[in-house]
Amino acid sequence: MLKLSDMAMAGRKVRRDDWDELGRPTQGAIADAIDEGRADDAKALSNYTIPESKALHDTFCDWLWDLFTQIAKRHGEEELHQMLRLTQGGWMMKRSWLGFLKMRVEDRVYLTAEMMRAHHCGPDQDGTLDIADRGDHYAIVMDPCGSGGRMRRGDPVDRTPSRLGPPYNFGATKEAHEWSWGQAGVPYYCVHCVMNEVLPMEWGEHPLWVTDYEADPQKPCTWKFYKRAEDIPEDYYTRVGRKKPAPGEGKY
């Protein structure tokens, strides 16, 4: 039997179903509630899917930033760069890069929006995005991003502070690097977004999308998907130590 009720220690509602029902996926319970005409239960469970998935998502993001900080502290910032390059340059980015090459730009945006909704973007961490056609590119605006943005600002939903301060004290680049958009002070977690640009540049000479990173964590972060590679501004190449290819060069 469905029992969605407040749990004081968690600070929110939690499923406390009978043991034989507790392991059933929430989406199945939503479908049953709809089929049985229990609209209020269906709405409550639909809202519950957000905090249900948020806790594990946020813990892993926090853990990654902490791991990146420890690597940089113990082995130096360049070792962090190489670690990101090796891990992102393998199965993960290669797979998505090859898939995206076969798609229209619009389809890349549709799939990326799906991914970022699941990434708990937005002030309520419910996946809210602002997506717009800006003429030469499509923009996905995250205010904040569900990982780096949330951690830099602090989490208003969980009432936890910025991870740049205590008790976390996660790190940021001490020096400006080509792999930190030519800036010091970029959170080690956010550096993986630089690799999202640099690796496709190395494989195909153009990034699939570019990031408008804001040093002020209170400002939104934007991903831009240019409709034509030749329209990507030169600055997005030079900031990571690359030269923009001539028109017609590259794989897309």
Image: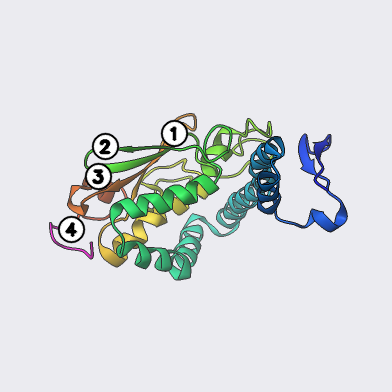
Answer above or below: position of 242 versus 133.
Answer: below
140 relative to 65 in the view: left or right:
left
| Mark positioned earlier in the residue sequence (4 or 3) | 3
Which type of secondary structure does the marked residue at label 3 adopt?
A: helix
Few, some or many residues within 10 Å of mark 3 (<14, 14–19, 20+): few
Q: Give me the residue at 60% from left, 57% from top.
A: 74
Tag 2's secondary structure? loop
**Relative depth, front residue between 207 and 75:** 207
Which of the labelled discs sits on residue 235, or is there none?
A: 3
Q: Nearer the viewer, residue 223 or 111?
A: 111
The amino acid type, in three-letter code, at marker 1 is Pro
Label 3 is placed on what type of residue? Answer: Asp
Q: Earlier in the sequence, mark 1 or mark 2?
A: 2
Q: Secondary structure at mark 1?
A: loop
* Foreground tag (2 vs 4): 2
As drawn, which residue projects farthest toward the left?
247
Q: Secondary structure at mark 4?
A: loop
Count neighbours of disc 2 (C-alpha within 10 A) and say few if under 14, some if 14 to 19, many if 20 or more. Answer: few
Residue 235 appearing in the image: yes
Disc 1 + disc 3, Cβ < 8 Å: no
Callout in the foreground (2, 3): 2
Q: Which residue was labeled with disc 4?
A: 245
In this rendering, which labeled residue sits more in front, label 1 or label 2?
Answer: 2
Q: In the rendered image, which residue does mark 1 sit on?
A: 220
Position of residue 241 measured from the top left corner of the image (x, y, whole percent):
29, 53
Q: Which mark is residue 134?
A: 2
Residue 251 drawn in magenta: yes
Measured from the top left, where is residue 96 in percent x and y?
Answer: 41, 63
Q: Choose the circle earlier in sequence order: 2 or 3.
A: 2
The location of residue 24, given as percent across then percent down, is 75, 57
Amino acid marked by disc 4: Pro
For the point 44% across and 33% down, which residue is it? 220
